[in-house]
Image (cartoon, helix red, strand yellow):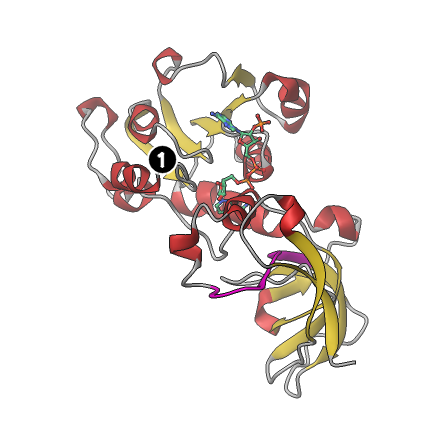
Amino acid sequence: MNEMRAALYDRYGPPEVLYEGRRPKPTAAPGQVLVRVHATSVNGGELHVRAGKVRLLTGTIDRGFPKPMGVDFTGEVAATGPDVSTYRPGDRVWGLLPRRFGAAAEFVAVDARQLAPAPATVDLVQAAALPAAGTTAITALRDKAHLQPGERLLVRGASGGVGSVAVQLGRVYGAHVTALANPKHREALQDLGAHEVLDYRTTTPADLPRYDVVLDTVGTEFPAYRDRLTRSGRMVAISFDTDHPFTSLAYSSAPRSSSAAKSTSSAATQNRPYWPNCPA
Ligand SMILES: NC(=O)c1ccc[n+]([C@@H]2O[C@H](COP(=O)([O-])OP(=O)(O)OC[C@H]3O[C@@H](n4cnc5c(N)ncnc54)[C@H](OP(=O)(O)O)[C@@H]3O)[C@@H](O)[C@H]2O)c1
């Protein structure tokens, strides 16, 4: 009873390294809620973590093996800590684990403040795809880039978890949305609201016009995409090239060379990779 099933891995590698193992079942400490997990999801960054490509970064977050998986979760409240009155057993909730993995398990214990009632109109399995990707996209476009109606937005990696939400948000915020993606997703991206869809395999940065906001979820060629900004443009980069992490991070921190691509005063933050409140 004090153990639960969880997805674990004992070495870095492909999906085959994952197995169903046992971990201690958490309990709800003061201020916490114990959630019986109904569904979790796999975010793009987790693949790099599991493959060991970013072990210099993640090793400090979660040392040793076996390592757990999963950030997003949906489920129902199993128990509450002594001082939690906002949730009751049986409530449908969703959330994400802050700066740690472990949602791919039967239970998670999280601070009540990090939970929200699950949406009533979305299936709990589908909803589990949204917490990390959705909060990343909304933080990037609304809080970091301050995207305004009528601005031109480029979403690089538009068919991915974060990109597909960003396309929808960009449209809702009244921007003109260009999606840079694999063309097999053209129709789906148009359905999500993209005004135009460009093929990332045949489009180079030099082919592109200038944009007020570039959201880069891919992480390669930072300077070339940064140079596609208008004078007041803002770039939010949420990823880096895992094959060349140090070059990539150095590029992202360097001042821009093109005066035509001058940024706003807050671009010093926006031109560095922005890491949201999760390790994925
Ligand atoms: N998910 C999160 O909450 C989160 C949070 C913070 C940071 N991040 C980082 O953001 C990155 C993306 O995450 P994600 O969850 O959105 O990943 P994802 O779902 O795997 O999506 C990545 C997308 O990028 C596309 N892509 C690959 N190369 C491309 C290129 N050269 N140009 C344009 N698109 C390209 C892929 O397209 P095809 O495979 O279809 O060709 C795929 O649709 C990851 O590196 C992750 O570490 C993610």
263 shown above or below 32:
above
Ligand 1 lies under 8 Å from the Cβ of mark 1: no
Residue under label 1: 235
- On the question of residue 71 being in view, the answer is yes
Picture quadrant where residue 37 is located: bottom right
Secondary structure beneath label 1: strand
Q: Position of residue 171 (x, y in %)?
A: 56, 30
Q: Nearer the viewer, residue 242 or 228?
A: 242
- Specify start and end residues of the magenta stretch as a single range: 62-73
The picture places residue 214, in percent across and down from the top left corner, at: 40, 30
Number of callouts in the render? 1
Quarter of the N terminus within the rendering? bottom right
Can residue 150 be seen here? no
Which x, y percent locates residue 248?
32, 37
> Does residue 1 appear left or right of residue 238 in this picture?
right
Magenta segment, principal secondary structure? loop
Which quarter of the figure has residue 191?
A: top right
Q: Is residue 77 left or right of residue 228?
A: right
Q: Residue at x 37, y 18 (%)?
A: 205
Where residue 232 sits in the image (x, y, percent)? 28, 31
Task: Verify whether residue 65 appears in magenta.
Answer: yes
Residue drawn where x is 63% and y is 65% of the image: 115
